[in-house]
Image: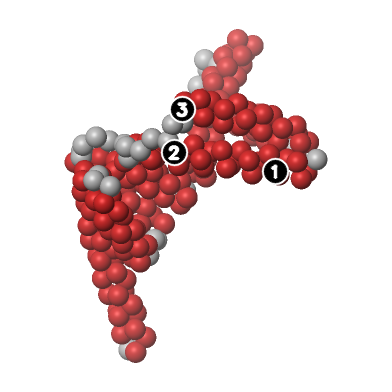
Amino acid sequence: MKNLFLKYQTALGTIFCLWLFLTIFKKLGFTFGVNLSVFFRIFLFLFIIWLVWITKIKWSEINAIIKRIWSEVKDKFIAETKKNQEEIIRFSPQLLTGKTGSSLSFFIAFIFSFFLLSWQLVKKIFKVYVFNRITFLVLVILGILLDIFVLKSSYDLVIIFLTVLWILSVYRYKFEGRISVGLALGFLILCPFLLIFKKELIAEKSAIWAYLFLVVGVVQLFIENFKKEKESVQKED
């Protein structure tokens, strides 16, 4: 059963890679006589089967995680509600006394705790799963590939936005300058092949990104060398 699941998973990944490969080549003007819409629907159908399958196999683990998270959230929510209710009563003891006042303070504390914990949960999800190193890198590269191969013309705002996003990624996650230079060389190597297939607009966009990454990479390398020289001077002193 395990071997069958692994084979199915490999086949699903192969189908997705084939669909992605054919889609990219179709955007470049090639056609291989394949209906990409049908191809993608087949992948989605098989993906749903895989998702149900893996959920069934790992249901005990998933159920344990859900129970643990629910227990933690419930305990924290109850504690926050009691704490906020006490703070609300302390803030206005005359208006929130008696049975009615106690119910009102509990309701206000309940609503406040709900929104507070929801906001904290959203922040945690964004911090862990959205604003992380891999996601930023994938978003930048995917955005650049969409700009090169999908958009019909060059848009300055898109280029500026993606460049700023890459610079922020470099600053936030301490990417080395050689990564920017490597990406620049990759886009530069892509240019002659695109020109061979008479894709002048795509080649022009690729050259623009090669230049931008080269500029960012050179600035990074200059800053890195400056810091190294400064540290060596400090060590000698």
Asked if the residue under mark 2 is in contact with the one under mark 3, i.e. CB atoms within 8 Å, the reply is no
Outermost residue, front side: 33
* Alpha carbons under labels 1 and 2: distance apart: 22 Å
Mark 1 and mark 3 lie on one chain; the one further toward the N terminus is 1
Q: Residue 60, percent across and down?
A: 78, 36
Q: Which residue is mark 2?
A: 22
Mark 1 and mark 2 lie on one chain; the one further toward the N terminus is 1
Residue in the picture at 38% in, 40% down: 25
Q: Which residue is mark 1?
A: 7
Q: Which tag is nearer the camera, tag 1 or tag 3?
A: 3
Q: Residue 131, percent across and down?
A: 45, 45
State left or right for residue 126 relative to residue 150. Answer: right
Q: Quadrant of the N terminus?
A: top right
Q: Residue 168, percent across and down?
A: 33, 51
Name the colouring of the figure: secondary structure
* Alpha carbons under labels 3 and 2: distance apart: 10 Å
Query: Which mark, residue 53?
Result: none
State left or right for residue 185 relative to residue 75. Answer: left
Given residues 161 and 102, the one toward you in this image is 161
User: Is the residue marked by circle 2 packed among few (<14), some (14-19), or many (20+) residues within 10 Å?
Assistant: many
Outermost residue, right side: 1
